[in-house]
Image: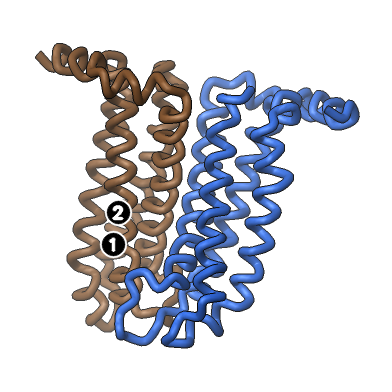
């Protein structure tokens, strides 16, 4: 069933064209990398602020308020470009354990983004960042680095991508 | 291509550390991940400052002093990216040194981006304080954003032109 869906996706003429033309394939990669840098870099800065390791004079709520719109726009671009590249070789990513690991790590990382975004102004009103907030921020950083590691391990270990 | 450059590439990629990375299953992706993690910090913090200068997402609240706030992590990211990048380069230095996309990235785009970045970092505290963003600040922010996008483009194109 899922494999059928992958095959259908992979044979879709638009997907074939976008992945088979070298300049559009390169454009997908450029968008994927650039948006990933902005997504991970901005989120890590928010996490580091919660940990008290970046600009303590800078109000955490304001910093998060400024960075989160870029984080989500970057995530949307990253997801879209990533999905289009996945679709081009969908049957090879099907049952690719390392790719599944990558997706799981990213989903968990995104969950940390959502929690931090919702809670940061509350934490900021307290006299100090609570320990639970710092643990979550540290987990978020580890997960985003983990997403990068998983990302490079997909082609390294499975030869796909 | 200049033969002394190729000679250097040949010498570098035969250093024990370069051979070790090339010959290990886990080292190469680990170095790649290091390069990308450093780049996330570097590009992420640069883009944050650039977009701030462009006035994107600016509200009536007092302007953010993003350049000062992010200064240390900005350069930590650059340091990590350079270390990772140098190690990736040393694994196949000879090939990289004869790749036009790589040479454009290293010899032209990165020096330009760095020079502009340092100028922006010196001026940003003043620019960020004014509630009305000057057109010079906007131009600088936009140009830097574009330059780093060009660097990523050149990097992605390395295997396409090689």
Estimate how packed mark 2 is, as few (under 14), some (14 to 19) or many (20 or more) residues with alpha carbons within 10 Å. Answer: some
Q: Nearer the viewer, residue A93 or A109?
A: A93
Q: Position of residue B44 (x, y in %)?
A: 46, 57
Quadrant holding the N terminus of chain B: top right
Q: CA distance from mark 2 to mark 1?
A: 6 Å
Query: Up-down: is B15 above or below A149?
Result: above
Which residue extends farthest right?
B4
State which chain disc 2 sits on.
Answer: A
Q: Position of residue A39 (x, y in %)?
A: 37, 52
Q: Are marks 2 and 1 on the same chain?
A: yes
Give the residue at mark 2.
A73
Q: In the drawing, does residue A20 fall left or right of residue B4?
A: left
Query: Up-down: is B135 above or below B84?
Result: below
- Asked if residue B17 shows in the view, the reply is no
Q: In the drawing, does residue A79 fall left or right of residue B88?
A: left
Residue that appears at 35% across and 61% down = A47
Q: How is the image coloured?
A: by chain
Q: Are marks 2 and 1 in contact (CB under 8 Å)?
A: yes
Count of numbered tags:
2
Q: Position of residue B125 (x, y in %)?
A: 55, 81
Q: Nearer the viewer, residue A29 or A142?
A: A29
Give the label on residue A69, or none.
1
Identify the hue of chain A.
brown
Query: Up-down: is A53 above or below A21?
Result: below
């Amino acid at each position: 069933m899922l494999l059928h869906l992958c095959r259908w996706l992979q044979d879709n003429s638009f997907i074939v064209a976008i992945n088979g033309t070298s300049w559009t394939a390169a454009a997908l990669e450029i968008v994927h990398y650039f948006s990933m840098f902005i997504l991970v870099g901005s989120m890590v800065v928010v996490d580091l602020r919660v940990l008290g390791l970046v600009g303590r004079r800078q109000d955490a709520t304001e910093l998060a308020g400024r960075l989160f719109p870029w984080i989500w726009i970057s995530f949307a671009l990253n997801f879209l470009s990533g999905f289009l590249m996945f679709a081009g070789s969908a049957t090879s990513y099907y049952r690719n354990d390392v790719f599944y690991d990558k997706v799981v790590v990213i989903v968990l990382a995104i969950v940390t983004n959502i929690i931090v975004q919702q809670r940061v102004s509350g934490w900021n009103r307290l006299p100090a960042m609570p320990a639970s907030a710092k643990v979550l921020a540290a987990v978020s950083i580890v997960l985003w680095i983990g997403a990068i590691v998983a990302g490079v391990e997909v082609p390294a270990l499975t030869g796909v991508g | 291509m200049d033969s002394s450059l190729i000679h250097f590439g040949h010498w570098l990629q035969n250093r024990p550390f370069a051979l070790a990375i090339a010959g290990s299953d886990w080292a190469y992706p680990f170095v790649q991940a290091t390069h990308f993690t450093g780049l996330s910090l570097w590009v992420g913090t640069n883009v944050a400052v650039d977009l701030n200068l462009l006035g994107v997402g600016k509200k009536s609240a007092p302007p953010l002093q993003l350049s000062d706030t992010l200064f240390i992590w900005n350069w930590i990211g650059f340091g990590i990216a350079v270390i990772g990048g140098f190690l990736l380069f040393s694994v196949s230095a000879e090939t990289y040194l004869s790749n036009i996309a790589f040479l454009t990235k290293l010899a032209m785009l990165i020096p330009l981006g760095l020079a502009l970045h340092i100028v922006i970092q010196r001026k940003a505290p003043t620019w960020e304080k004014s509630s009305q963003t000057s057109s010079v600040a906007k131009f600088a922010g936009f140009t830097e954003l574009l330059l780093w996008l060009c660097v990523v483009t050149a990097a992605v194109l390395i295997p396409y032109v090689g």
